[in-house]
């Protein structure tokens, strides 16, 4: 059975972002999390992470629908 709660480093790995970016998502409230333990370590429920990912897919679909031909800020000027 997979773990119910993930550390921010795990969240960062899943999303392929930095730990600082994962922390910012939590602190902004975009990604719900809890603080546990004496040192108040952040934990993100796996279910909440999946819900966040689904919200980002929905927002991306809306953005693409609203900007079908591309334009500033769509990433078309970036290379991978």
Image (cartoon, helix red, strand yellow):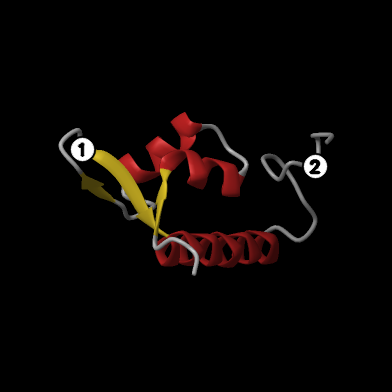
Report the disc number at residue 63. none
| Circle 1 crowding by C-alpha within 10 Å: few under 14, some 14–19, many from 20 | few
Identify the residue at image location x=83%, y=36%. Answer: 80
Q: To which residue does mark 2 refer?
A: 76
Q: Is residue 3 above or below residue 30?
A: below
Q: To which residue does mark 1 refer?
A: 40
| Circle 2 crowding by C-alpha within 10 Å: few under 14, some 14–19, many from 20 | few
In the structure shown, which secondary structural element does the residue marked by tag 1 occupy?
loop
Using the rendered view, name the quadrant where residue 41 is placed: top left
Of the pair 27 and 49, the residue shown nearer to us: 49
In the structure shown, which secondary structural element does the residue marked by tag 2 occupy?
loop
Q: Is residue 70 above or below residue 2?
A: above
Q: Earlier in the sequence, mark 2 or mark 1?
A: 1
- Please indicate whether residue 65 sits to the left or right of residue 2 in the image: right
- Please indicate whether residue 13 sits to the left or right of residue 30 in the image: right
Identify the residue at image location x=54%, y=32%. Answer: 18
**Residue 12, how many percent across, how many down?**
53, 41
Cα distance between the residues tagged 2 and 1: 40 Å
Residue situated furthest front in the rendering: 1
**Residue 28, how many percent across, how many down?**
33, 43
Using the rendered view, name the quadrant where residue 48 is placed: bottom left
**Residue 3, how many percent across, how many down?**
44, 61
Q: Nearer the viewer, mark 2 or mark 1?
A: 1
Q: How many marks?
A: 2
Identify the residue at image location x=77%, y=51%. Answer: 70
Using the rendered view, name the quadrant where residue 35 is placed: top left
């Amino acid at each position: 059975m997979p773990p119910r709660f993930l550390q921010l480093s795990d969240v960062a790995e899943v999303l392929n972002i930095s730990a600082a970016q994962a922390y910012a998502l939590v602190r902004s409230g975009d990604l719900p999390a809890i603080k546990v333990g004496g040192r108040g370590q952040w934990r993100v429920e796996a279910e909440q992470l999946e819900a966040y990912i689904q919200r980002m897919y929905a927002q991306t679909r809306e953005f693409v629908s609203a900007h079908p031909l591309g334009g500033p800020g769509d990433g078309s000027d970036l290379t991978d």
